[in-house]
Amino acid sequence: MDSLELRPPSAGWLREAGARIRFMCLTKMIGTALTMTAFFIAYFWLLNHSRSPVTTVPRIFIDRMVAFWPGALVLYVSLWVYVPLAPALMKIRLEMFSYLGAVIVMSLVGFGIFILWPTAVPKTGIIWSQHPSVFYLKAVDASGNAFPSLHVAFAVFTAVWMGRLLRAMGAGGGVRALNWLWCFGIVYSTLAIRQHVALDAIAGVVLGALVAIAHLRFLGALRGRAPSPYVVAMQVTTTFGIDGYEVAEHKGLVRGIVVRSPTIAQGILGGLKNIIGGSIGAYTEMCEQAREEAYELMIAHAQALGADAVLGTRYDASSVEMRTGAVEVLCYGTAVILRRKA
């Protein structure tokens, strides 16, 4: 970056996270609580009204590799802290509402499988009364609704989105690695406390990953077809004034920062094009996606400050990681409130 004051400090992503959490905070809290409540009502109704016969999901070699550990219950229940983090960190309404839609679709797919093919985990021979904490879970959440593990599906779906959000906030590699480590811990816990078997977990990973990928592709296509909902209500210009208006109030510097690396497909296509020569369309697509996302984050920042225009809009970019091709894109400007000239 050319300007030191525009480069966020190493902990700058934490301030960005705070701003994101404050954005529509009450709406996101109520929406998350209502969604989780509706999910549990449907889940437990299906659990107590399963069709017969119920298929017992068999154990495989992975189950024999994972020892029973009651202490993993902490990781298991941490899912309900982990899952709300992604919507809490969103600042773009399109993302928020499409995210809710994806969660509903994933839940309906899981519920549909539970209805059409009721399953349960096999008996373990463990005396649950000797492990009070896990015994309570077993009493509340019986062995049904096993395949696929929606617990795992939600963990994977959340991990994909948290990775995307953390990159957008400029969080370091260590923080992003912790995100995936948390996800892995939740998946491991389902086996360690014998709430699921490996086949349930594998199916949950597949379901969560497929829904996350489909959702991100849908979101990208939707952005390509329609302008951002922020653009309609916000005037953005590279100049420092707009004809017929004057600045009534300055709200300060606003910015959106995105760190994006090529997908596997983009990396392969870009590498081949490097050999042949010419314009590298795969990398152009990656950079355009990064610019668009940084632009929308800047607009969201301006909206959160109550501005109705952004003046002096500029882009800046730099390479973050040469090995992976990661690029940092910064979109910034001055947020203001305009009024018509007399």
Image (cartoon, rainbow, N blue to C red):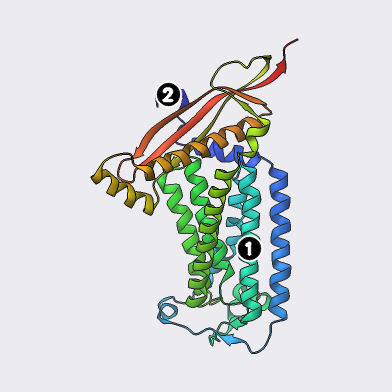
> What's the residue at 61%, 39% (across, down)?
228
Q: Position of residue 323 (x, y in %)?
A: 30, 45
Residue lying furthest bottom: 53
- Provide residue 330's location: percent of width, then percent of height: 47, 32
- The residue at which mark 1 appears reads as 105
| Residue 287 in view of the camera | yes
Residue 100 at x, y percent in the picture: 65, 55
Which amino acid type corresponds to the residue marked 1 in the rendered image?
Answer: Val
Question: Would residue 142 be visible to someone looking at this image?
Answer: no
Q: Residue at x 37, y 43 (%)?
A: 281
The residue type indicated by label 2 comes to Leu
Instruction: Tell me how far mark 1 sits from mark 2, CA to CA.
Output: 44 Å
Which residue has dot 2 on it? 4
Q: Residue furthest top?
A: 342
Rendered-image quadrant of the N terminus: top left
Q: Nearer the viewer, mark 1 or mark 2?
A: 1
